[in-house]
Image (cartoon, rainbow, N blue to C red):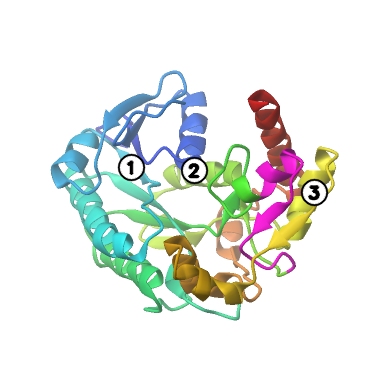
Amino acid sequence: MPGKQERIVIIGWGPVGSAAGALLASQGRTVVAAQRSAPANLPRGVGYVRCDVLDADSVRGAIAGATQVVAALGFAYDGAVWRASWPRAMANLLDACEAENARLVFFDNLYMYGPQNAPLTEVTPLSNYGRKPAVRSEVTRQWMARRDRVRVAALRAPDFYGPGVTLSHLGDSGFARIAQGKAAQLIAPPDTPHDFAYVPDLGRAVVTMLDAPDEDFGQAWHAPCAPIATPREILQIGADAIGAKLKITTLPLGMLPILGLAAPFMREMHEMRFTWDRPYHVDWSKWARRFGPDVTPHEIGAAETARAFQSAALLAA
């Protein structure tokens, strides 16, 4: 960016943040990871700065000198935590980026659309359904209201999976258990079509967004994902790749309210049952028209993911 040496700060070194950061580092670009504690897996050349997104001064200090910021953060899967944390974090990010004149790529999900029966598009209306979807809608309105002062691009993705991605519907309870010779345990109907994104694709999409001109900011983009498939089909590809027999046990969605009485996580999942009780399809044609269909087929992504979990299981044995 003119007049300023490139410095990209990635707030949140989780699966997507680290995938984008590793790619940027491989390109020889200046990358800094920012979160409350230093990641253990920083690639060579990637810096670190402590950042608490709920502290305005901490955010301002972390992105000092940044030309672009990637927000790929997350909070505990709890509606009350989201209600208290997400609007505050977004306000801090927007204030800091405005002060620094830095662009912001916000890695987002699709909760703000609420229950839908048609493919999700970037113009699907925002919803105030439930606690977590309503919070994501509020956060969206926050950055949209500041588009004249802060250049923001929201990259929205469905559930994702990939090598080493444990905290996902297909991670520890799916690919990891298959690699251990156990039955996958799903809190979702295994035969309902559902779009999943592959984390390496999401990392590339973040970098694509960082390299896009300003006219592509001020709007939302649905991240690319392979053609829709069922969880069973994706896990079957992985099982075949490592020579495992696929076995799946599922928890009926109707049991979530009962289990939620004793397990808060199940109560939170019950609110989001609309993402699993019907086909969940993401229309990312806007991205394809602008940036091209850069997507990994499940036949490759699921196989690579299963092999990675198998290697991890062998190392742990």
Quick check: 212 left or right of 144? right
Q: Quarter of the image holding residue 86?
A: bottom left
Q: Quarter of the image holding residue 309?
A: top right
Q: Hey, what amino acid is under mark 2?
A: Val
Q: Hey, what amino acid is under mark 1?
A: Val
Residue 69's disc is: 1
First in residue order: circle 2 vs circle 3: 2
Measured in 3D between alpha carbons, the distance from the residue under mark 1 to the one under mark 2, in whole angstroms, is 14 Å
Identify which residue, 225 or 88, lies in the foreground.
88
At horizontal 38% and vertical 50% (from top left) the residue drawn is 74
- Residue 100: x percent and y percent? 19, 42
Quick check: 43 left or right of 224? left
Residue 237's disc is: 3
Identify which residue, 304 or 271, lies in the foreground.
271
Q: Return the residue at label 2.
A: 16
- Residue 284: x percent and y percent? 59, 63
- Residue 204: x percent and y percent? 55, 42
**Furthest-front residue in this view:** 262
Q: In the rendered image, which quarter contains the C terminus?
A: top right
> Magenta stretch?
174-191
Front disc: 3 or 1:
3
Kindly state the secondary structure of the residue where label 1 is placed. Answer: strand
